[in-house]
Amino acid sequence: MGAGKTSAGRLISKALDLPLSDSDPFLRKRYGATAAQIAASEGADVLHQREAEHVLAELAGEPKVITAAASAVEDPRVREALREAFVVWVDAPDAVLAQRMRSGDHRPDFAPSVMRARREPYFREVADITFDVSTTTPEEVAEGTLRALRSPARDGG
């Protein structure tokens, strides 16, 4: 949702030497359209199904860093699949999300406050770590994520 997840994801994937799978290129490659185009031509429900499909398809493959559209967390199959993954929630106040949503024409024109209110409980359910990207840079998100992944507590010790 325009929260800097792709920038942070690139840094994390490079540091871990894992491929990156981002929802925007996935949609363009598989459906030949951006999220905004899919939402406009086929509706938000179809877009959200395809964004969930992205996460499910990529979680089923080899390990990678997945930068998923926020809508994917609404799908109970995605939430179940995410239980085995390390999930980073990049969050921000509604005003910041609204500003970032307008930063690219590939993004659909959805109301962040409505989306965030609906999705927040799901993110709280699946997230291992959360960053407020209104006060945290992608570099800090990546550093914090890598620190958490390498934490002895994460390894059970």
Image (cartoon, rainbow, N blue to C red):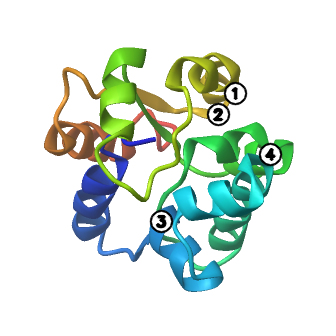
Q: Is residue 8 left or right of residue 117?
A: left
Q: Is residue 24 above or below residue 70?
A: below
- Alpha carbon of mark 4 to alpha carbon of mark 2: how far? 9 Å
One can see residue 144 in this view: yes
Which residue matches tag 3?
Answer: 24
Residue 118 locus on image (x, y percent): 70, 21
Which residue matches tag 1?
Answer: 122
CB within 8 Å, label 4 to label 3: no
CB within 8 Å, label 2 to label 1: yes
Q: Secondary structure at mark 1?
A: helix
Any mark on residue 112, and which?
Answer: none
Residue at x 19%, y 20% (from the top left corner): 135
- Alpha carbon of mark 2 to alpha carbon of mark 1: how far? 6 Å
Any mark on residue 80, and which?
Answer: 4
Quadrant location, the C terminus: top left
Under mark 4, the amino acid is Glu
Residue at x 19%, y 28% (from the top left corner): 136
Under mark 1, the amino acid is Tyr
Residue 103 locus on image (x, y percent): 28, 45
Under mark 2, the amino acid is Val
Which residue matches tag 2?
Answer: 126
- The residue closer to the viewer here, 57 or 108, is 108
- Considering every residue shown, the one lying at the far front of the view is 41
One can see residue 93 in this view: no
Q: Earlier in the sequence, mark 3 or mark 1?
A: 3
Q: Is residue 10 above or below residue 39?
A: below
Residue at x 37%, y 74% (from the top left corner): 18
